[in-house]
Amino acid sequence: MENFFHVAWERVLLNDGAVHMDYGSESDILAQKERLDPLFGNTATIAYGGLGTIAALLLCYAADADPVFLVLALVSALLSGLRVLLALGYRQGLPTKAVNNQLSPSRLRYWNAACISGGVMSALVLGVWCFYVQSHHTAPFIVLTAFTATLANMIGICGRNYPSARYVNLQMLVIGLPMITGIWIYGGLLEKFLGALLIANMVSTVAMARSMRNTLDTAVLRGQEIAASEAKLSTAMETVPSGLVMFSNSGRLVFANSEACELLQLRQPVSEDNTYISEAIEILSAISSDPQTHKTKLNELINQRSEPFSFEGRDGRSFMVACGCSPDASLVLRIDDVSEQKLAQARIERLSQYDSLTGIANRERLFERARELYDRFEGRGLAFAVVDVNSFKILNDTHGHSVGDAALQILAKRLDGCVDLNGVCGRLGGDEFVAVQHLDSPAAFIAWCKQINESTNAAASIQGLQLDLSASIGIAHLDVSEYRRGAAKTLVDEAISQADFAQYCAKRDDRKQIQVFDEEMKRQMERTAVLRDGLVAAIDQGTLESAFQVLVDVETGFPKSAEALARWTHPELGPVSPAEFIPLAEQTGAIRDLTIWQLENACRCCAEWPGDISVSVNLSAKDFSSDTIIGSIEKALQQAALDPSRLIIEITETAMLELRTDVLAAITEIRSRGVRVALDDFGTGYSSLSYLHKIPFDILKIDRSFVEAVESDPRQLQVLSGITQLARLLEKSVVIEGIETQEMMDLLSERVDFDLAQGYLFGRPMRERDIATLVSAFGGTGSRKNGFSAVA
């Protein structure tokens, strides 16, 4: 039977105007099923319609005993029973159960054909009945009964079968065509008029069915759009990493995505549970480490729409809860797991407050914490220690930066162990550290200073190396007589500056590793501040002076060069030693301007001397931190119109050891321009002969400290002789400084091979006009022995 309907009706029914859409997509299949549902509808209406038709046919049979009525009643009964069985099968899910519990286009076509086939055949029985009574009976009761039953079924066709245009049209055709044909053949004029009205009624019925069908199509499409939107919304909500919970305006839980269900241990779908806001608050509060506080905040969030808040869960995770309302007054809670963000924020905050290498406080956090301690203890009993690692540059260069970093980490750990909760340890930068500690007695202060000293000056094992770490320490004590709120920044900065100055004094005095800031240092510090300001003004105003000390040719005794030395007389403090103001210039950055002034002034003076006399100018390692030094030298030479070979740039041995590769390249560039370079003060630094061939220089100047003992110690003389012989092998000129007596000069001249001599024996540093007079008196080169001393 199924195959018969499928084959016989499928071709006709495929073009049904109401079900013309493709069966390819799942949404199209669902839409087709929604149109089939009303066709099978309520089985009771099919049964009642069939029983009414059967009863009417039996009444006609009772009135006339015509067997045709009995046959039509039997056919109607069979068709009605079949249609009821089909409807029951459809409603019990046979369309899906037949194909692995899945809807399929072929099954839907079958049920569509079966439905229309049964209905059209039932309608055909009514049409045949009406035609028959007109052609064989004239009894008014029989005709009225047939037409009444048929018209009643026509009304049911419109109300039940409207989803299918083909269904309605076929039923109207098989009912209306026999009825109207019978009227036109067997009826009179009035009956024909009634037939015309019947045609109008049929057209109206078809139009009503079309209108209802269009309404259904619109509803179906709208339903599909809503379903699609809901599916997209559901997908979007499921892909959101947040937990989303939605309550209706009545407070009932209507939606929760999988993230929220997992967090709150809800069952899916949540719409089947009768969960309300109050219960959800209890569930949310239960996952908090502080349920009561969390519950209060949740109520405020929901009832007062307060700001989102975060809380810690029992499992250690962190959450953020926010609340919002949709346009239909439903409530949405958003729960975010912000554990990663919290950890990242903590890492960022730590990086902003702590040194990445050592883990102790950085400069900003150090000063902030020190000011907090000042306010907590009202400026009483605070000790400040500034610690600077000794020879850290040498340690880095000798063993590498990894060893240097490890040394800083060890020192930081040791220093951090010297402070407790009432203190702080931080890194100022480089190899300089600060420790601050509140101490309640002089004895505690002394003990703390001792602890700092012992901790920072002790051996350490680093990467298999046994290293003796040492540091210079400066201590300052802050103990105000009257606490002033708001003065923390000024007083803390001042205390750290005092400790830093004490550390500088400790480093300058090789006999002491630790110095406590005292009144004498305070006076020195005040003097330093005055000198610092005055030096900048002196450079700007050009009130510095140059002094020159001659270098004498050992063979001729004639001056061959002069070293330019800066001299400064402070308007209030009087003459200031270069050993005092040159380091100040390096600290303040004024050394660059000082060097430029010295270069230009020395070149100008040299240009006025005889042509074989040169001038040397000392440069600091700080001068090479800027890439303008070469340009400054060229400018000084051009302004004075001085031959580059008459200018000598002196760089100390200690400074040379600190130069980087790019700076060494700059020195090479200077030499390429014809300017000579002298390695000054050899003997005050490493005094290592092995690195002499690596440094680009022309002249080796041996420091006075190296030759002071040659008269009393023959071994020192032998060492000095060996150094000069090595310099000869490297094709370097040799200058010996600090020659003060004729006896020393005679001894060195006899036992040591050198080119030029410098020292008080040949003259102290002299002013510009005096050096000009001196070198002019020789008028150039000479050949007589000890010629200089004869003139001097």
Image (tube, grey):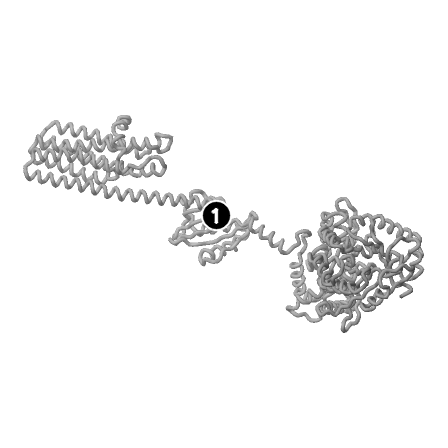
Mark 1, secondary structure of its residue: strand
Report the front residue among 20 and 180: 20
Q: Position of residue 232 (x, y in %)?
A: 41, 44
Q: Position of residue 484 (x, y in %)?
A: 66, 70
**In the rendered image of this protein, does residue 67 appear above or below residue 532?**
above
Q: Residue at x 16, y 30 (%)?
A: 73
Judge whether residue 444 can be spotted in this image.
no
**In the rendered image of this protein, does residue 757 appear above or below residue 96?**
below
* Tag 1 residue: 243
How many neighbours does mark 1 have within 10 angstroms: few (below 14), some (14-19), or many (20 or more)?
Answer: many
Q: Quadrant of residue 52?
A: top left
User: Which quadrant does the C terminus fall into?
Assistant: bottom right
**In the rendered image of this protein, does residue 141 appear above or below residue 373?**
above
Q: Amino acid at mark 1?
A: Gly
- Relative placement, left or right, of 569 versus 181 is right
- Relative placement, left or right, of 154 versus 87 is left
Judge whether residue 83 can be spotted in this image.
yes
Q: Quadrant of residue 630?
A: bottom right
- Which residue ends up furthest to the bottom in the rendered image? 572
Report the front residue among 569 and 628: 628
Q: Position of residue 3 (x, y in %)?
A: 28, 26
Q: Position of residue 730 (x, y in %)?
A: 83, 48
User: Which quadrant does the N terminus fall into?
Assistant: top left
